């Protein structure tokens, strides 16, 4: 059934989230971040207006995932909301300490770049909307005749002007808060990030049509470009510091620890693998086509050559590119894999025991869940929720006792998932078909043969709050945002809704009131069990009220959105928990 747009739920929850952010801005950080609060309001208003127009005209991006709304407003405000929450959290610890002030400037830079990326996204969507459904205006001549006038070009010109002015103001505000070489570097990297985000969204829709909505596209593209821009800034800063002293350069302090450096090296190297593999494969294919002699043995061994090309590119990325970047940019003297081994053996008994626990739980769970899925007697959505429960069993103990090691483990797991998905999507023999058949047993309507995203969204939903939580000891519960919302809330909502739900929240989704309430209550109960293990050990009444509101908002986002809730809900929940 084709999606029929409606007003209400998702937009209302977004306004609740933004209202909570503005409340925090007004009472905690307005004197520090008045321009940031104003930018967040204007961005939300622009996204809401565009959402209204697109729904009234029943507009859908031609390459969008079918059966889902555009997600314009949710995609545009998610990352700016996360960085606004970081800024508000930083206000509570403002001091004259140079490291803290440098951290605030870094987060402020990320906020304004995310605002600029969202502005560019809204402009592209508005241009697409006007192009696909051009509006004709009418006017009267002196003779009284009605003449049709094309208003599209005029509207596009006005939008282009407003879009350019908004981008200019964003970068001007960003540069005014910085000075010296650091300001120039941040603004330069910001321009390239906006351009990269725009390019990446186009690549996602052209390379993987019908695999994502515009909201999901901007979330992924903005996250990747912000991450890559952060890495680029580190690299430029490192090179600059080689030629001048840190006192005279005026650069921002390079943050992060060895775990951040290792994860950055692995993920950036892996993202280059498909491009490098494609170049080599196309070159070899053209050579075979140009050859006048058909080598039958080469034809028979084509699969072997394909597998060898992939292994060579993967080995080059992991054994050469990642260690080189780690040494040149982050200054680590050890090889990448030796550094990972040192991090594992830093507390050998505790961390090796945790690894053994993960292997046992994962091995038993995979065998059991695959058998259940193969029998076909259990509803597929329940089978998929088994993985959510497994994530809770695996990650909650690690989050309480070994959060730093879990950061590394999440990165290694994501790298493994990336390699497996490359093997499946690129059809690398002999494992490509085997992996594809295994993964198809757990897919839903959001997956396709081109791209299977369910396992990525689950892992990233659990991992992103922990990766983003740069001050874990100050706000430890925020690190649990992904596991609580995805592993517990989403699972309980699905189980209760499927078995006992009767009151549907909307006629276009299967989400029910009973399931939503069960999800919200289960997260609150889980929080009450986790809080005694946190450094504070207890919550005040004000903290509990803020927690209940955050849980309510995240539960409603999960209930009303047709986007990838495993990605959006943890980020929204995390931002609210930071307050």
Image: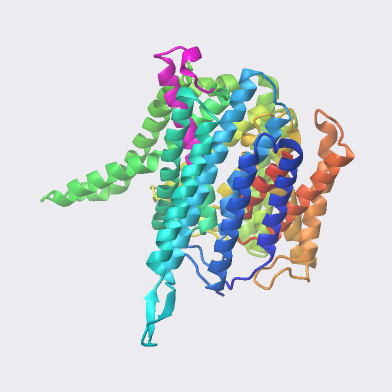
Looking at the image, residue 120 sits to the left or right of residue 479; the answer is left
Where does residue 172 sit, x and y in percent of width and height? 49, 38
Residue 240 versus residue 208 in the image, above or below: above
Where does residue 68 sit, x and y in percent of width and height? 57, 65
> Which residue lies most toward the left here?
292
Where does residue 58 sit, x and y in percent of width and height? 53, 72
Residue at screen point 44% across, 31% down: 232
**Disc count in the image?**
0
Residue at screen point 59% across, 45% down: 79
Q: Give the range drawn in magenta.
A: 223-252
Looking at the image, residue 217 sits to the left or right of residue 305; the answer is right
* Location of residue 546 (image quadrant): top right
Residue at screen point 47% across, 46% down: 167
> Which residue lies most toward the front here?
142
* In-front residue for pair 41/202: 41
Looking at the magenta stretch, what is its main secondary structure?
helix
Image quadrant containing the C terminus:
top right
Image quadrant containing the N terminus:
bottom right
* In-front residue for pair 341/376: 341
Residue 518 versus residue 25 in the image, above or below: below
Residue at screen point 39% across, 28% down: 321
Task: State yes or no: residue 243 in magenta.
Answer: yes
> Which residue lies most toward the right here?
541
Where does residue 218 sit, x and y in percent of width and height? 51, 51
* In-front residue for pair 104/429: 104
**Is residue 213 among what the camera can see?**
yes
Task: State yes or no: residue 294 in magenta.
Answer: no
| Figure coloring | rainbow
**Is residue 443 among what the camera can see?**
no
* In-front residue for pair 166/313: 166
Looking at the image, residue 568 sits to the left or right of residue 436; the answer is right
């Amino acid at each position: 059934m084709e999606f029929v747009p409606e007003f209400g739920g998702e937009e209302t929850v977004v306004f609740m989230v933004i209202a909570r952010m503005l409340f925090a801005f007004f009472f905690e950080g307005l004197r520090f971040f008045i321009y940031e609060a104003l930018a967040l309001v204007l961005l939300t208003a622009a996204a809401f207006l565009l959402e209204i127009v697109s729904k009234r005209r029943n507009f859908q991006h031609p390459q969008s995932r079918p059966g889902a709304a555009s997600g314009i407003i949710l995609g545009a405000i998610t990352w700016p909301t996360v960085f606004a929450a970081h800024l508000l959290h930083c206000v509570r610890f403002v001091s004259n300490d140079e490291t803290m002030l440098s951290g605030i400037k870094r987060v402020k830079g990320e906020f304004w770049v995310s605002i600029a990326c969202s502005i560019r996204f809204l402009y592209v969507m508005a241009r697409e909307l006007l192009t696909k459904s051009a509006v004709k205006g009418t006017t009267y001549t002196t003779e009284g005749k009605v003449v049709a006038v094309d208003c599209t070009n005029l509207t596009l010109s006005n939008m282009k002007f407003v879009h350019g002015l908004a981008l200019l103001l964003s970068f001007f505000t960003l540069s005014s808060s910085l000075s010296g070489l650091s300001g120039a570097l941040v603004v330069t990297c910001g321009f390239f990030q906006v351009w990269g985000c725009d390019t990446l969204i186009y690549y996602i829709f052209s390379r993987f049509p019908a695999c994502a909505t515009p909201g999901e596209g901007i979330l992924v593209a903005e996250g990747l470009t912000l991450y890559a821009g952060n890495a680029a800034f580190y690299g430029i800063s490192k090179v600059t510091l080689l030629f001048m002293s840190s006192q005279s350069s005026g650069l921002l302090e390079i943050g992060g620890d060895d775990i951040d450096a290792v994860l950055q090296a692995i993920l950036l190297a892996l993202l280059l693998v498909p491009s490098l593999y494609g170049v080599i494969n196309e070159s070899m294919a053209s050579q075979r086509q140009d050859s006048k002699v058909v080598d039958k043995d080469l034809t028979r061994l084509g699969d072997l050559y394909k597998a060898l090309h992939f292994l060579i590119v993967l080995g080059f990325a992991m054994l050469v590119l990642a260690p080189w970047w780690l040494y040149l940019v982050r200054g680590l003297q050890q090889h990448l894999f030796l550094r990972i081994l040192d991090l594992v053996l830093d507390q050998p008994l505790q961390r090796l025991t945790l690894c053994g626990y993960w292997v046992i739980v994962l091995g038993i769970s995979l065998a059991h869940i695959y058998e259940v899925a193969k029998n076909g007697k259990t509803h597929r959505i329940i089978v998929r929720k088994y993985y959510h429960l497994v994530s809770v069993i695996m990650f909650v103990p690690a989050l309480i006792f070994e959060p730093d090691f879990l950061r590394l483990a999440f990165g290694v797991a994501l790298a493994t998932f990336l390699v497996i998905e490359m093997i499946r999507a690129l059809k690398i023999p002999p494992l490509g078909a085997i992996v594809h058949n295994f993964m198809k047993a757990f897919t839903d309507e959001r997956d396709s043969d081109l791209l299977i995203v369910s396992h990525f969204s689950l892992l990233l939903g659990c991992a992103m709050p922990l990766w983003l939580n740069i001050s874990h000891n100050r706000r430890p519960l925020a690190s649990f945002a992904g596991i609580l919302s995805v592993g517990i809330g989403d699972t309980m909502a699905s189980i209760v809704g499927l078995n006992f739900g009767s009151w549907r929240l909307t006629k276009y989704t299967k989400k029910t009131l009973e399931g939503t309430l069960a999800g919200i209550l289960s997260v609150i109960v889980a929080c009450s069990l986790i809080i005694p293990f946190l450094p504070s050990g207890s919550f005040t009444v004000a903290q509990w009220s803020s927690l209940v509101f955050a849980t309510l908002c995240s539960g409603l986002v999960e209930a009303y959105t047709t986007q990838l809730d495993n990605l959006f809900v943890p980020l929204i929940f995390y931002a609210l928990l930071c307050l």
